[in-house]
Amino acid sequence: MTIATYGVNGSVLTRKDDALFLGDVKLVLRSAIDEDHEGDRTMNRWDGLVAGDDVVECIFLHPELTPECWKVEDGGEPRRIFHSQGHTETESGPFDWVVYMFWSGGKWNLSEPICEFEWEDFGANAYDIVPEGAVGR
């Protein structure tokens, strides 16, 4: 059953049952953090990423699009979903930052900008929205 549909840059973002689709492509959550064999964490990069800023912002503005399984972990902890990132020059040097969204109070909320390395510390509770079948690189 279709629950909600919104247009995003010429495509249609649709929630059907407990899944989200951009056109015919199913979008899923995948770990935003890659951990190497030495335990070092870095931000994951995805080939074929289609969930750009417009898709994430549409989900943020229209929470009814959000599949229930995206909102919280099994233990009740809110999932952290990548929203945006940037780079700022400060007096103390460059600052690479990340903003994530998290579910609270029946809606998505945005974090304050945090250092990229703090985002990496979230590990398994940090997610990107990617097309089903996307491969990390």
Image (cartoon, helix red, strand yellow):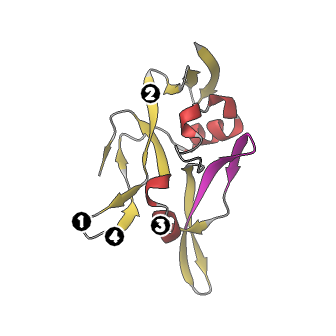
Marks 1 and 2, how far apart at CA: 30 Å
> What is the secondary structure assignment of the residue under circle 4?
loop
The residue indicated by pointer 2 is 26
Q: Secondary structure at mark 1?
A: loop
Earlier in the chain: of badge 3 and badge 4, it is: 4
* Quarter of the picture holding the N terminus: top right
Please name the residue shown 59% across and 67% down the image: 114
Look at the numbered discs 1 and 3 and tell me whether their residues touch, using CB distance below 8 Å: no
- Horizontal placement of 59 versus 44: left or right? right
Residue 73 higher or lower than 89, as above or below: above
Q: Which residue is mark 4?
A: 40
Tell me how far mark 4 sits from mark 1, CA to CA. 8 Å
**Number of numbered discs:** 4
Please indicate whether residue 60 sits to the left or right of residue 32 in the image.
right
Q: Looking at the picture, which amino acid does disc 4 mark? A: Asp
Give the crowd class for mark 4: few <14, some 14-19, many >=20 residues within 10 Å: few
- Magenta segment boundaries in residue numbering: 97-110
Q: Nearer the viewer, residue 74 or 53?
A: 74
Q: Earlier in the sequence, mark 1 or mark 3?
A: 1
Looking at this rendering, what residue extends furthest in the top direction? 1
Packing grade of label 3 (10 A; few <14, some 14-19, many >=20) is some
Q: Earlier in the sequence, mark 2 or mark 4?
A: 2
